[in-house]
Image: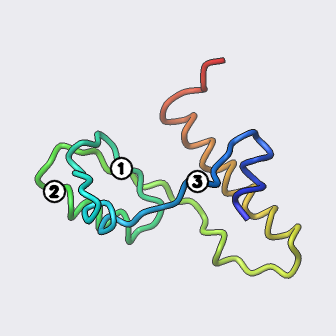
Amino acid sequence: DALPICAELGIEISRHRSRSFEEMQDLGDDLGQYDLIVALTPASQKLALDLTKTSHITVEFWPIIDPTTLGSDSREAKLAIYRQVRDQIAARLIERFGAPES
């Protein structure tokens, strides 16, 4: 449901997918190469803090609602929830990094 919601803003995410910290490590990603980890759930925040306790990586927790946990009967109602989440994340990005340049 996130694909059409992001497409509404001209953002193409069909090739993107989330990866767990374990997957990242299995693929050879070194968390030490990152400056910032944004956790969207308390569980991911705890894990990120545990994995980065010996490095200088900033871990921020952004409490964003999980659209998969909000039941809804109609497709339009589900899409409305995903829009709300998309807009929450966009607002947090602008708050943290500033508005995008044209």
Q: Amino acid at mark 1?
A: Ile
Secondary structure type for disc 1: strand
Front position among marks 1 and 3:
3
The 10 Å Cα crowd at callout 3, few under 14, some 14 to 19, many 20 or more, is few
Is 34 left or right of 96, judged from the image as shown? left
Mark 3 or 2, nearer chain start: 3
Identify the residue at image location x=21%, y=64%: 50
| The quadrant where residue 23 appears | bottom left
Way the structure is coloured: rainbow
- Alpha carbon distance from label 1 to label 3: 21 Å
Is 68 left or right of 59, judged from the image as shown? right
Q: Which mark is residue 10?
A: none
Q: Which residue is mark 3?
A: 15
Q: Amino acid at mark 3?
A: Arg
| The quadrant where residue 21 appears | bottom left
Secondary structure type for disc 2: loop
Q: Residue 6 in the image: x percent, y percent? A: 72, 49
Q: Which residue is mark 2?
A: 53
Q: Is residue 64 above or below residue 88?
A: below
The 10 Å Cα crowd at callout 1, few under 14, some 14 to 19, many 20 or more, is some
Please state which of residues 21 and 67 is positioned toward the viewer in this rendering.
21
